[in-house]
Image (tube, rainbow, N blue to C red):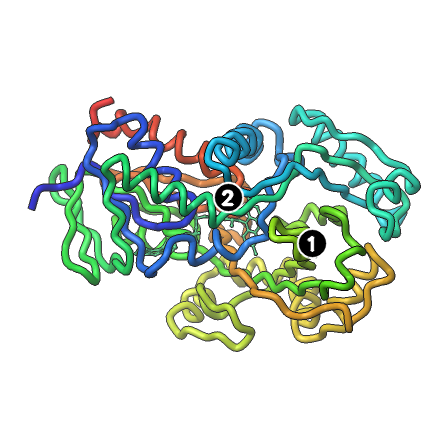
Amino acid sequence: MQPFDCVVVGGGIVGLSTAWAILERNPQARIALLEKEESLAHHQTGRNSGVIHSGIYYKPGSLKAKLCRAGSRRLIEFCQMHDIRHERCGKVIVATSQAELPRLNSLYERGIANGLAVKKLTQDQVREIEPHVRCIAGIHVPETGIVDFVGICRKLGELVASSGGELRLGTKVHSIQTRGGETVLETTKGAVSSRLIINCGGLHSDRLATLAGAKPDARIIPFRGEYYELKPDRRFLVRNLIYPVPDPQFPFLGVHFTRMIDGCVHAGPNAVLSLKREGYHRTAFNLWDFVDTMTYPGFWRLVRRHARSGLEEMYRSFSKKAFTRSLQKLIPDICEADLVPAEPGVRAQALRPDGGLVDDFLIVNNRSGMHVCNAPSPAATASLEIGRVIAEQIPRCGAIQA
Ligand SMILES: Cc1cc2nc3c(=O)[nH]c(=O)nc-3n(C[C@H](O)[C@H](O)[C@H](O)COP(=O)(O)OP(=O)(O)OC[C@H]3O[C@@H](n4cnc5c(N)ncnc54)[C@H](O)[C@@H]3O)c2cc1C
């Protein structure tokens, strides 16, 4: 069996961007992408909010800040080049109480530090942009947009295939062994060998990394994000994107309103612990996933720190009334009858043994290759840049000659 130069595991937007970036730099390389599902973008990438993030939230200098800013520009160019639906519609972030004003101001400063054209807004200026919002002040972020991430993945898949890469769908990796300079991946469709592997396994990235002998020092904890959708005759309440001021304690942005690229308006997502890594229903349960979470000391440290907000999130998950109340803080005219449930997603969030959420993107190298062990939001926005960063490091791994 002739080994591949590189095998990418995971057919989400990060794996596809990476495979394409490697092929662009190494057109002669023999590359395969293995995806366990029968379609691309089946998990996080196909179940997200569809927002091109601007980079306002992230610590200046962090990978998230740098790759999100550059990634959003490249994503828009990619969409223009390949005729993929997208729109740079801008968003407002609004404070609904005096207590939120200092945090809104810090966010504004961070936006400036990250090189964004953010603008402070009075209550009236917010209402000129979003007439149904109730707030005391806001920020306008013109760089934010909306996009069809699944369409991007389809195009990336075509580009990988037409550049000589092999896309193997329905191929689940269940064991990885590195001997000498070669790694053998046992899959549901037979063994595949490669000089180098790139693990972009999303919700399973930590397990794949461990199988390959890497020590990510963090475990993926799955957080389900549930959405409602506004009934078509109530979509007029939201023109574009309306976000609250996020709680800096959490990596998630708080329930918000998003006009999707297909015209529907989503409200959400919340963030509740999922008892199954790819569990899209409240009662979804997987014993292995459950035990993995419950036996991880970091999880219990996280629970101790955030018990109250965790319980509030769970309550909001089961109570549509509570979910609606959170939304009414932003738009008081919304009522329960305006909302119908929409498809949820599950976020892969890496957690350290000390209970700290891994804030930045995390890529771990070992002799088998590279493992993307934390790629939460805005990784879809930043994906083309994450792929570039990985592809640039590959010659140093020695598998592919640049
Ligand atoms: C609710 C929600 C809202 C979000 N909103 C946004 C947003 O608006 N903007 C934004 O930029 N980001 C957003 N994100 C984050 C973004 O969706 C993710 O960061 C991004 O999709 C991660 O891509 P990925 O390729 O790493 O993971 P995934 O898309 O999950 O892909 C990983 C792939 O690996 C495959 N895989 C796993 N294990 C194996 C195995 N053993 N063998 C073979 N294949 C395997 C899986 O089947 C999967 O297809 C959101 C995420 C969620 C969940």
Identify the residue under disc 2.
Answer: 380
For the point 53% across and 72% down, the residue is 281
**Which tag, 2 or 1, sits closer to the chain's start?**
1
For the point 65% across and 61% down, the residue is 270
- Viewer-proximal residue, 77 or 199? 77
Identify the residue under disc 1.
Answer: 254
Would you say 173 lies left or right of 114 here? left
> Vertical placement of 282 versus 202: above or below?
below
Looking at the image, can residue 67 be seen? no
Would you say 380 lies left or right of 303 here? left
Measured Cα–Cα span from mark 2 to mark 1: 18 Å
Would you say 101 lies left or right of 208 here? right
Q: Quadrant of residue 141?
A: top right
Instruction: Give the x, y percent position of residue 166.
Output: 23, 45
Q: Residues within 10 Å of mark 2 (few under 14, many from 20)?
A: many
**Quarter of the figure with the C terminus:** top left
> Vertical placement of 286 versus 52: above or below?
below
